[in-house]
Image (spheres, grey):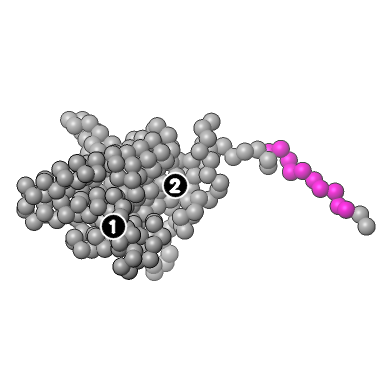
Amino acid sequence: MTVPERTRPPAEARAPRRLDAVPMPREEPPAAGGDESPRTVPDTPPGFREAVRGDFARIAAMKKTRYPSIYGLVDILGLPGTWAVLLFRVAVALHQRGFRPLSRLVYFLNGVLFTVDLIPTAVVQPGLALPHPHGVGMGDVRIGRNVVLMGGVRLGTGALGDKDRDGWPVIGDDCFLLDGAKMFGPVEIGHDTVIGTNSVVTRDLPPNVVAIGNPARVIKHRSPDGAVDSELDMRSE
């Protein structure tokens, strides 16, 4: 009995994939008869109950606790991030109803207790999660559903008085901003995008990507189920 000889692949097949060689995603044409219009981030805030229900469900899913249930509710209420999000929703509701002094008081209390700077004029859809809220700050941003902001994330205007950089970020649904990530000015990131630690976003990013660096650049593309298409390599070249 003879054992077949194993052959090594050619050198070019074994060469590591360059990060800057990752192709940009292509937009597929909509299917015939189907509604494939791109998702947009609403410019009006959700109702208080809808927002809180979505926030609690997202936080419970991240913590992998049973929810809705009494146990799950007690579990997530033991997290500082849950209270930071809840106080933010209260401040937004008071602001929307015209109780501006009370809204400012709740905003101030949230900053004192949890060192967050979440202004009540931000438009944030249900599902906001702040696992480690300390240092998170945002201005008049628009944020989609089920977005996670880790500690030290900052979202603000680019340059007051500069019409090219004056404006606020827009973040799509199901995005994940890791510790220290920053977005300034009228930049937009697509849905299901991950921004790496201490990255600075200075231009628009497409959906379903992983971006890192200063300025942030795309290094990977994600599958529709949220998985990274290939092994995530955070090494710089």
The relative height of residue 141 versus residue 77 in the rendered view (above or below) is above
Furthest toward the right, the residue is: 1
- The three-letter amino acid code for the residue at tag 1 is Leu
Q: Toward which corner of the image does residue 152 lie, by quadrant?
A: top left
Q: Is residue 9 magenta?
A: yes
Side of 37 where 229 appears, left or right: right
Marks 2, 1: nearer the viewer: 1
Residue toward you, 199 or 160: 199
User: Vertical placement of 168 versus 95: above or below?
Assistant: above
Closer to the camera in the image, 57 or 139: 57
The residue at the point 24 percent across, 49 percent down is 84
Q: Residues within 10 Å of mark 2 (few under 14, many from 20)?
A: many
Residue 165 point in image, percent of width and height: 25, 33
Crowd rating for badge 1 (residues with CA inside 10 Å; few <14, some 14–19, many 20+): some
Q: Nearer the viewer, residue 189 or 23?
A: 189
Q: Can residue 203 be seen?
A: no
Q: Which mark is residue 77?
A: 1
Magenta stretch in the rendered image: 3-12
Q: Name the one closer to the observer, 196 or 17.
A: 196
**Secondary structure under the numbered disc 2 in the rendered image:** strand
49 in the magenta segment: no
Q: Position of residue 40 (x, y in %)?
A: 29, 55
- Whether residue 23 sits left or right of residue 36 in the image: it is right
Q: What's the residue at 28%, 57% (across, down)?
A: 77
* 107 to the left or right of 189: left
Q: Position of residue 129 (x, y in %)?
A: 32, 52
Disc 1 secondary structure class: helix
Q: Position of residue 36 (x, y in %)?
A: 37, 62
Give the position of the N terminus as an image quadrant: bottom right
Whether pointer 2 and pointer 1 mark residues with C-beta atoms closer than 8 Å, the reply is: no
Disc 2 target residue: 209
